[in-house]
Image (cartoon, helix red, strand yellow):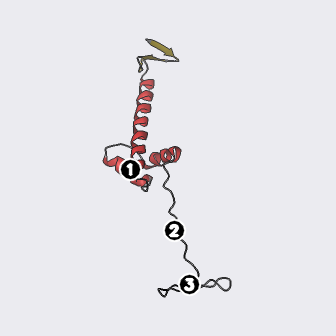
Amino acid sequence: MTHVQGNSTAHNGWCVVCSISIDRCSAIRLKSRLVKRMDAFAQLHPRHGNRMMWGTLRLEWWRIYVKRVHRLCQRKGFCVPQKHFKGRRFETNANGIDRAAASHRNDV
């Protein structure tokens, strides 16, 4: 089965005739494989950021720039969640740690 669209011809899911469309199709397949790998990495290491992901992909022989990893992480929502720290209390503790509230502006 052959479909003709514009200046390219697709035959059984593969682009034929125009080298630009072949490159475009291979780039789309490569991007989908890359995003699947990035998704697996984000599930395995949720606290790692895009630079750690980029370094791991480079070690796996992916030829990719850090800006592209950052852009794909933003689009796919692989953001590292912010850590929430428990606030300290303004009171005398049994262990001897005293933390007083500020009595006036710029009180350190």
- The amino acid at mark 1 is Leu
Please provide percent x and percent y for residue 51.
Answer: 42, 54
Q: Quick one: 95 or 25, which is closer to the camera?
A: 95
**Mark 1 to mark 2: distance in Å?**
23 Å
Task: Give the label on residue 44, or none.
Answer: 1
Q: Secondary structure at mark 1?
A: helix
Tag 1–tag 2 contact (CB < 8 Å): no
Q: Which residue is mark 2?
A: 85
Whichever of labels 3 and 1 marks the residue nearer the N terminus, that label is 1
Q: Quick one: 24 or 30, which is closer to the camera?
A: 30
Q: Residue at x 40, y 34 (%)?
A: 30
Whichever of labels 1 and 2 marks the residue nearer the N terminus, that label is 1
Direction front: furthest residue: 94
Please provide percent x and percent y for residue 55.
Answer: 36, 52
Q: Quick one: 23 or 102, which is closer to the camera?
A: 102
Q: Vertical placement of 56 versus 87: above or below?
A: above
Q: Quadrant of residue 1?
A: top left
